[in-house]
Image (spheres, rainbow, N blue to C red):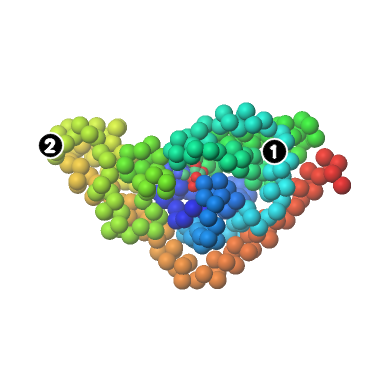
């Protein structure tokens, strides 16, 4: 994940919850992609603070740093080294066809794409393959990047010898959680997020402005849960009441204001343990720095081993 600030519930349900579950099944590695953050902002003044904020969110959501090393991309130089080698194994035409890049160019109104942004998935391939990643738990927008990673792994193995696995993406049931404004993706740049750190009252205020079925104008009108964003939130965060909510929305018995307040309450309850753990970690910053330094030491050992293998099969030195 890129350290662009505090995480939102899209990150949680699209990726982070999967990371937590997979910890017991796989050897996980979790990367703070601080170089990747430069693709959309060259300002590095908040990069370290944002990295720590994001790490606190990960730990609060259940990442166990003893099981899963956490580290910054910029602190393990092998990422840049492998990225350079990988950049020789893919054409610019292939990278220009990347649908995620096209989406970002459109959504962020980017007029001139920088070289690093075009090469985003190449650096990401290095991030994944340095640790010989077999499963990549990401949201839907990242699937094309995992496909590029597979192509690069195949190309490298064919050219130099079998070093890398071909990783598979691992999606959750909510690989693209919509934003409060009805946009198909919750994202910081669209300003349509509920943050993991939001208080119950902040969540309520945000939910009040959420977009609902445009055909349901007042309580009593029949609504269509399947086109309603707030119902999507109920499906994820309020599983025990969804049948009742769907029926009452359709019949008109449930108005949108009540429906939103109920969703806000459930999201608040769901996030409450994360928020508490978050506050505890915030009051122990040294513990968080130590976790990061330990993760960087452990990540570096694996990265060095892989790079030694790469250099060997490439007969470099
Ligand atoms: P990013 O902030 O773009 O680096 O995203 C970090 C991870 O969260 C990636 O795996 C994304 O696919 C995932 N993600 C971000 N926003 C959402 C969302 N609205 N729904 C589901 N997954 C998301």
Q: Is residue 224 above or below residue 24?
A: above
Q: Where does the image place residue 38, in percent across and percent down from the top left?
A: 56, 50
Label annotation for residue 220 = 2
Q: Residues within 10 Å of mark 1 (few under 14, many from 20)?
A: some
**Image point (14%, 38%), residue name:** 218
Q: Where does the image place residue 109, in percent across and percent down from the top left?
A: 45, 39
Q: Give left or right: position of 93 versus 2.
A: right
SS at badge 1: loop
**Image point (60%, 67%), residue name:** 290
Q: Give the distance between the C-alpha atoms of the residues marked 1 and 2, in whole angstroms.
A: 59 Å
Disc 1 or 2, which lies upstream in sequence? Answer: 1
Q: Is residue 54 above or below residue 219?
A: below
Asked if residue 20 can be seen in this view, the reply is: no
Mark 2 sits near ligand 1, with its Cβ under 8 Å away: no
- Residue carrying label 1: 87
**Image point (64%, 43%), residue name:** 123
Q: Give left or right: position of 258 versus 18.
A: left
**Image point (64%, 46%), residue name:** 127
Extreme-front residue of the structure: 111
SS at badge 2: loop
């Amino acid at each position: 994940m890129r350290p662009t600030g505090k995480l939102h519930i899209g990150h949680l349900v699209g990726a982070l919850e999967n990371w937590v579950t997979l910890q017991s099944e796989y050897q996980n590695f979790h990367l703070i992609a601080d170089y990747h953050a430069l693709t959309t902002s060259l300002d590095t003044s908040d990069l370290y603070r944002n990295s720590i904020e994001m790490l606190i969110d990960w730990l609060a959501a259940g990442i166990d740093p003893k099981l899963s090393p956490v580290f910054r991309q910029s602190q393990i130089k092998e990422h840049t080294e492998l990225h350079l080698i990988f950049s020789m194994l893919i054409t610019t035409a292939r990278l220009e066809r990347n649908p995620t890049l096209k989406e970002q160019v459109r959504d962020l109104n980017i007029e001139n794409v920088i070289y690093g942004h075009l090469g985003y998935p190449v650096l990401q391939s290095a991030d994944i393959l340095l640790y010989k990643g077999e499963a990549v738990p990401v949201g839907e927008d990242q699937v094309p990047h995992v496909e590029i990673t597979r192509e690069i792994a195949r190309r490298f193995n064919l050219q130099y010898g079998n070093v890398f696995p071909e990783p598979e993406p691992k999606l959750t049931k909510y690989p693209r959680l919509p934003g409060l404004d009805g946009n198909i993706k919750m994202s910081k740049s669209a300003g349509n997020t509920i943050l993991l750190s939001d208080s119950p009252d902040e969540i309520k205020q945000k939910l009040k402005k959420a977009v609902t079925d445009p055909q349901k104008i007042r309580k009593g009108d029949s609504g269509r849960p399947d086109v309603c964003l707030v119902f999507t939130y109920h499906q994820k965060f309020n599983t025990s009441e969804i049948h009742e909510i769907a029926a009452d929305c359709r019949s008109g018995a449930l108005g949108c204001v009540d429906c939103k307040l109920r969703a806000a309450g459930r999201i608040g309850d769901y996030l409450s343990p994360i928020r508490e753990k978050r506050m505890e970690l915030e009051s122990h910053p040294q513990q968080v720095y130590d976790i990061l330094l330990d993760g960087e030491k452990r990540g570096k050992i694996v990265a060095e081993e892989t790079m030694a293998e790469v250099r060997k099969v490439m007969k470099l030195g």
